[in-house]
Image: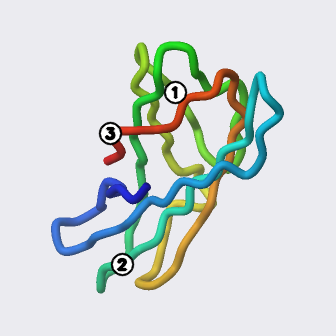
Amino acid sequence: MVGLATPAEAATSATATYAKASDWGSGFEGKWTVKNTGTTTLASWTVEWDFPANTKVTSAWDATVTNSANRWTAKNLGWNGTLAPGASVSFGFNGSGSGSPSGCK
């Protein structure tokens, strides 16, 4: 799945790619990779996605992850928000349930 991370400026663009790193039946480990595909440096990034009602993030690393109902939001930490053109950063999480993300932006 490819979606857009929120750019710091209108002239910037980014992609967010999701991969399920492992699955143990009742839960899983997910990983998002955010890449700056623009020509200017991103000062910060945000990834948003939806999970089905039975799926949720139980812990996360390398991002602050919050939710409102089934809508999840991940924001950079203080040390990994700046992305030069062509650079990428990843964050991960453990989740419960078995749903896949949708509605990424």
Helix, strand or loop at mark 3: loop
Specify few, some or many for label 2: CA neighbours under 10 Å numbering under 14, 14-19, or 20 or more: some
Q: Residue at x 18, y 74 (%)?
A: 11
Q: Nearer the viewer, residue 8 or 47?
A: 47
The correct choice, above or below, for 25 with respect to 23 in the image is: above
Looking at numbered disc 3 in the image, what kind of residue is underneath it? Gly
The correct choice, above or below, for 65 with respect to 47 in the image is: above
The correct choice, above or below, for 31 with respect to 37 in the image is: above
Quarter of image, res 56: top right
Q: Nearer the viewer, residue 41 or 34?
A: 34
Give the CA distance from mark 2 to mark 3: 20 Å
Q: Position of residue 80 (x, y in %)?
A: 59, 61
The correct choice, above or below, for 28 with respect to 44 in the image is: above
Q: Position of residue 7 (x, y in %)?
A: 29, 61
Extreme left residue here? 10
Closer to the camera: disc 3 or disc 1?
A: 3
Q: Nearer the viewer, residue 51 or 43?
A: 51
Residue picked out by circle 3: 103
Give the CA distance from mark 3 to mark 1: 16 Å
The numbered disc on residue 37 is 2
Q: Position of residue 15 (x, y in %)?
A: 39, 65
Looking at numbered disc 1 in the image, what kind of residue is underneath it? Thr
